[in-house]
Image (cartoon, rainbow, N blue to C red):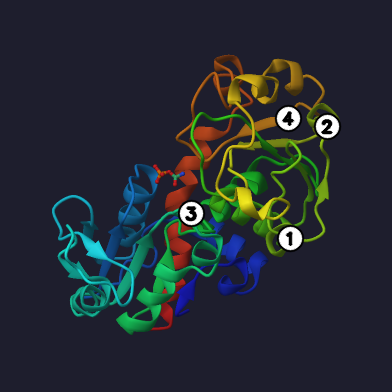
Amino acid sequence: MESFLNVQDLGDLQSALAEAREIKQDRFKYVEMGKNKTILLVFFNNSLRTRLSTQKAAQNLGMNVIVLDVNAGAWKLETGHGVIMDGDKSEHILEAIPVMASYCDIIGIRSFAGLADRQYDYSETIYHQFLKYSGKPVFAMETATVHPLQAFADLITIEEYKTTPRPKVVLTWAPHPKPLPQAVPDSFAQWMNAADVDLVITHPAGYELDPKFTGDAHIEYNQLKAFEDADFIYAKNWSCPGVTYPEKYGQILHDYHTMMDWTVSSRQMAVTNHGRFMHCLPVRRGMIVTDEVIESPDSLVIPEAANREISATVVLRHILAAL
Ligand code: CP
């Protein structure tokens, strides 16, 4: 596997889930695979879970790990082409990428959407520059439009906790004070569409996600109706994806104070089928979800985060196998 952005990149999904179960039984089963291999994790943005779980996964596979926080200690990188570099950016990404690649065998990239230029974000410009100029396998640790390591961990968690062969899974928008990217809901929709679940997406009008990720998922604008008989509730905020309102890409469409009835509380959870609550974390309590719901026995946020180690171990194993 030369690139990991989408669910299709991993091959057969049921086989990947079986591998996840195998690795959960014995995390070090493939510790010899990564011997004398080096992985470089490049962070343009903050992280807790991705940073730790991906390092742990690489260690499970016996790899050496280097972590670079581009904005803390490295030269500030220019990403634009044809720019006169007379500002505070000292190094161009087109030199930095091959230099970074010379020290490693695999590169992970975290580079969030800028939310200013939809075309730039949705063409995954930074990720594809790494792919083109590194000559090394590259994988997404949340890029402009996708977060596949998270979505895979979410699916592993749903498989572990489901009580029916084909559960009803609801992806719900929830309020947030700042505009956030669409990477988590995009990937969640894509992976759920590839899995054996019934996916319903609920959000206020105007927040329609890109159909290339949502596919045939049912969109229900009435959140309470969407929650009826749901087995899993996956909450996330996202800014305007620019599908219905291209000119509002990356913006918050309403004052969040007026949207607080979308916060997931026991009121909505009461109509579910004893639904389990999920969120990728970090989460803002009182905005996305109430304390009561996230602290309830039906909350899966901690096992979901723990499964990030498993999803990353499976993905890195696939990349190592193709080196
Ligand atoms: N869910 C997730 O990716 O968490 P971090 O942003 O802390 O890595």
User: Which numbered circle lies on residue 116?
Assistant: 3
Q: Which residue is mark 4?
A: 275
The local secondary structure at tag 4 comes to loop
Viewer-closest of 11 and 92:
92
Q: Residue at x 43, y 83 (%)?
A: 322
| Sequence-earlier tag: 4 or 1 | 1
Disc 3 vs disc 2: which is toward the camera? 3
Query: In which image quadrant can residue 118 be found?
Result: bottom right
Mark 2 is on which residue type? Asn
| Sequence-earlier tag: 2 or 1 | 1
Alpha carbon distance from label 3 to label 2? 29 Å
Disc 1 vs disc 3: which is toward the camera? 3
The local secondary structure at tag 2 comes to loop
Alpha carbon distance from label 2 to label 1? 19 Å
Q: Which residue is mark 2?
A: 222
The local secondary structure at tag 1 comes to helix
Q: Residue at x 81, y 27 (%)?
A: 224
Q: Residue at x 65, y 45 (%)?
A: 158
Mark 3 is on which residue type? Ala
Q: Are marks 3 and 2 in contact (CB under 8 Å)?
A: no
